[in-house]
Amino acid sequence: MMVELPVAEPDLRRRVDRIIETSSRQKEQNIAEGANMWARVTSLLPATLLRASSWLQFRGLMGNSNLLVSNVRGPSEPFYCFGAKVHAFHPYFGVQDGLGLNVVLFSYGGDLLIGIAADPHLVPALDSFAEGIVKSFGELATAIV
């Protein structure tokens, strides 16, 4: 689902409200379901066609997008592997065809885990981006109180 991010909006509450409004409208129109169907169809393709479909999805359908954000609701109960509790996951989704930046959010056991992948030619200051995420969550937490 494509959502334009209002990055030029200086007011935090208005930014969040605009994102909620846009994404809610798209969810009502079942736009996200189309993307899910695309993923199911492409999962059946042989490897040679999968590369072409990847380009179509990430460049053809997404146009000039340069950021992909995925959120996955994970389990609230802990997983175990050979009797040992799994304490964390490292969410990751590789950068696709020059997309630039991928952010994956995954919840597990009440924690939010964030994975970031970037094309270093397109995002040379990834550490600044990661610091910005931490700062933004701090702003959101302050605004909620």
Image (spheres, rainbow, N blue to C red):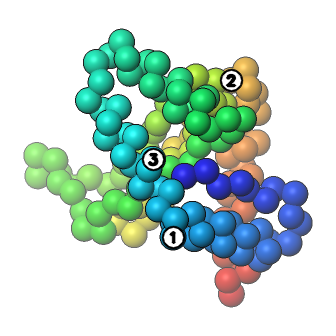
Residue 12 appears in the rendering: yes
Q: Quadrant of the C terminus?
A: bottom right
Query: Residue 120 got which mark?
Result: 2
CA gap, disc 3 and disc 1:
14 Å
CA gap, disc 3 and disc 2:
27 Å
Residue placed at 67% from the left, 83% from the top?
144
Return the disc, 1 or 2, that comes first in the chain's sequence. 1
Q: Residues within 10 Å of mark 2 (few under 14, many from 20)?
A: few
**Circle 3 SS class:** helix
Residue type pointed to by label 1? Glu
Residue type pointed to by label 2? Pro
Return the disc, 3 or 2, that comes first in the chain's sequence. 3
Could you say where residue 56 lies in the image, as x and y percent from the top left?
Answer: 53, 27
The residue tagged 3 is 35
Please name which of the two marks, 1 or 2, marks the residue nearer to the observer. Answer: 1
**Circle 2 SS class:** loop
Residue placed at 67% from the left, 35% from the top?
63
The residue tagged 1 is 28
65 up-or-down from 12: above or below: above
Q: Residues within 10 Å of mark 3 (few under 14, many from 20)?
A: some
Residue at far bottom of view: 145
